[in-house]
Image: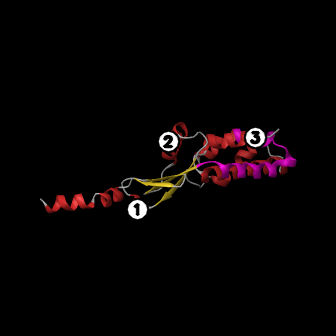
Amino acid sequence: MNSVPLIIATILKYAYTRVEAEKLLSVFRLLSDAYFYQQADARMMESIIEERFRHALDTTYYFESLPELIQLAQKSSKGRIYETIHDVSDALELLPVLTLYVPTKLEHIYIATIGTWVRGTINEKILLQFIISAAYRGGCGVSWKGIMKDYSFNHFLQRESRSIQSLIQNV
């Protein structure tokens, strides 16, 4: 059985960014290692992940995904597990990425809101990439398929600088 599509679907159910997807793949690998090489049951696998990520911020999606990732690890073939993980990693690399330039780090709830909208509007298998830059105060920038659009306040001020200068000089 080719479990790669199931693993990708599960990862995309909980992860909206490329970084989150890669982290969930590493969680899947940890679970698989625990199951195959430590004979860990589901509770022990959960404990391993909880211990590993208990101090990490914005990791609720790790814990929400655990039941499904544990089941997938248990259904995987020990002899092919690393090949499967490699195939999933390759498949994740091929997914489209929408890059958003934002002024500050966003909490996961906002990432999930944006991700849900993007997947419902643009592509159900899209991953987000957030780049933090103070240059995007009062807005954001968007990059899709090599085209960059700047919707920041700074860009607006630069674009309208002559009109603004004229307005100020005429007051």
Q: Which residues are magenta?
A: 68-96
Q: Pinpoint residue 145: horizontal percent, then vertical percent.
A: 55, 52
Q: Earlier in the sequence, mark 3 or mark 2?
A: 3
Give the quadrant of residue 42.
top right
Q: Where in the figure is residue 116, as x and y percent of width and height?
A: 53, 39
Q: CA distance from mark 1 to mark 3?
A: 42 Å
Numbered label attached to residue 72: 3
- Residue at point 80%, 39% (across, down): 75
Q: Is residue 158 left or right of residue 147?
A: left
Residue tagged 1: 135
Q: Secondary structure at mark 1?
A: helix
Q: Is residue 11 left or right of residue 111?
A: right
Q: Residue furthest right?
A: 79
**In the rendered view, does 64 fall on the left or right side of 6?**
left
Q: Looking at the image, which is closer to me, 99 or 63?
A: 99
Residue at 77% across, 41% down: 3
Considering the image in quadrants, where does the N terminus appear? top right
Give, as a three-letter code, the residue at label 2: Thr
Residue 66: percent from left, percent from top: 68, 42
Q: Secondary structure at mark 3?
A: helix
Circle 2: element type: helix
Earlier residue among tags 1 and 2 = 2
- The residue wearing badge 2 is 113
For the question of whether residue 48 can be seen, the reply is no
